[in-house]
Image: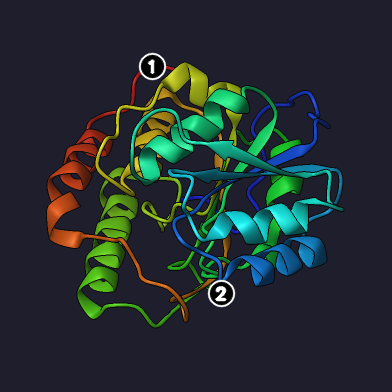
Amino acid sequence: MHSSTEPVPTSSSTHDSRPLALIVPVYNEAQNFPALVAQVERHVPPPFTLYVVYDFDQDTTLPVARALAADRPWLRLLKNDVGPGVVSAIKTGFRQVTSGPALVVMADLSDDLAVVPRLLALYRRGYRIVCPSRYMPGGRQLGGPFLKGLLSRAAALSLWLLAGFPTRDATNNFRLYDAALVGELGIESTAGFELALELTAKAFRRGVKIAEVPTVWRDRTAGQSRFRVLKWMPHYLRWYFYALRPSLPA
């Protein structure tokens, strides 16, 4: 059966009380970053650490982030030392965060941080990946390019129907992971936002416990998106067909 909004674990697990780490890749997000920090302070229960992962020293986010970090010890800057691009930035974050809950968050205010307490509650109950879902009952997607949304929804719902994939939103990169699990699975993605699909597909085929909760996604209102549908499509298809293959024995 497919996962429900708050599925019940099939086996008991040790409650993990380690603090949350937020991994936030940035690229010239000076306009959005103060509002993101305000949303974090409003919705994310402490203690937590927020890692601002940047590619280059001239990024417009940095002066704003440094000013905000002056009286926020939980706000830390981390230079991407893997390579340019969002996947490399997230890899850099997971090199820093190797255990406990880790939440990948976009800096463009598209993600609804009000769901973070629910994500953490499911993580504490033993789920090793918790997926905010735009395409399950209660979820919504507001704005954004039509083709991007259509392809994302079609891919996610077809995986859910055909393979019993445990989330109806396979491609949303706003996602909570057990950082140790990410280390076990490894990250092979190189192009862009196929990372969430890769990690969730690998975990699914291993029989890892995965949950989903509804979320509302909003397209950015400031700055420029770096999402490239056609360029990244082959990379998405690789992990889409991987997820369709039979699961490995638990």
- Quickly name the residue at label 1: 249
Viewer-nearest of discs 1 and 2: 2
Element type where label 1 sits in the image: loop
User: Mark 2: which amino acid?
Assistant: Gly
User: Mark 1: which amino acid?
Assistant: Pro
Please give the name of the residue rendered at 84% of the width and 53% of the height, measured from the top-left corner.
Answer: 45
Left or right? Give the position of 177 relative to 6.
left
Q: Quadrant of residue 117?
A: bottom right
Q: Position of residue 125 (x, y in %)?
A: 74, 37
Label placed on residue 12 = none
Image quarter of the C terminus = top left
Please give the name of the residue rendered at 66% of the width and 56% of the height, measured from the top-left corner.
Answer: 65
Please give the name of the residue rendered at 39% of the width and 36% of the height, measured from the top-left corner.
Answer: 88
In the displayed structure, 107 sits above or below 211; it is below
Q: Earlier in the sequence, mark 1 or mark 2?
A: 2
Please give the name of the residue rendered at 43% of the width and 68% of the height, measured from the top-left corner.
Answer: 135
- Quickly name the residue at label 2: 138
Q: Quadrant of residue 205?
A: top left
Q: Position of residue 41 (x, y in %)?
A: 80, 62
